[in-house]
Image: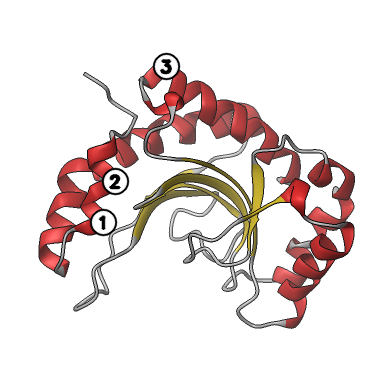
Amino acid sequence: MTKYTFKPNDFKAFTIDGLDARMEALNERVRPQLNELGAYFTQFLETTTGETFYPHVAKHARRSVNPPKDTWVAFATNNRGYKMLPHFQIGLFEDQLFVMYGVMHEAKDKAQRVDVFTEQFETLKNLPKDYSVSLDHMSQEKTYIHEMSDEDLNKAITRVKQVKKGEFFVARTLTPQSEQLKSDKSFLHFLEETFEQLLKFYR
């Protein structure tokens, strides 16, 4: 019995039509693991940083018609919310599991917050080849960092400062069939390894 990981069938919850039916499937197949991951990585982040973190599992409570196309647990140092702070996320779309850290468009002082990626530019460029950049947390689309020029990266960081909806996340993804999702042990190893890289940009 696995506690933390997701099976290919869990991702198929996003193919179910209708808000109520999809939410029921997500609550049954996906939310239990998100809650467990929330507890595990809250402790992991506290141990690593010495700060108190809080998990925020997506409730999708404001939805009345459209079923969610992704779901997640976010980690931040504020108990009341995470969007206003740089934060970590573990989540799922139909075709990917994602782990990421960055600045959402609702973040306070986001122009200053995103500067960490400029200050740590060499670290950003030299991340392993399976790390990517997401410019919109609501989109599945991500671009591998090793495929981006210095100019591309700088433009993406600057965009956060100039565009109201601008966001910047460093991400790592898995497909539903990935080997790392076959057991809790391999999944937690993947996540811890990812968090250690993402923590280079946390301050």
Residue, disc 2: 11
- 94 left or right of 99 in image: left
Residue 112 position in % (x across, y down) = 79, 67
> Looking at the image, is mark 1 or mark 3 earlier in the sequence?
1
| Dot 1: element | helix
Query: Mark 2 touching mark 1, by CB under 8 A?
Result: yes
- 13 left or right of 169 in image: left
Residue, disc 1: 14
- Amino acid bearing label 1: Phe
- Amino acid bearing label 2: Phe
Query: Residue 161, located in which quarter of the rendered image?
Result: bottom right
- Identity of the residue drawn at 70% across and 45% down: 202
Residue 64 position in % (x across, y down) = 19, 78
Residue, disc 3: 185
- 161 left or right of 192 in image: right
| Dot 2: element | helix
- Identity of the residue drawn at 80% across and 71% down: 158
Label 3 packing within 10 angstroms: few (<14), some (14-19), many (20+): few
Label 2 packing within 10 angstroms: few (<14), some (14-19), many (20+): many
| Dot 3: element | helix
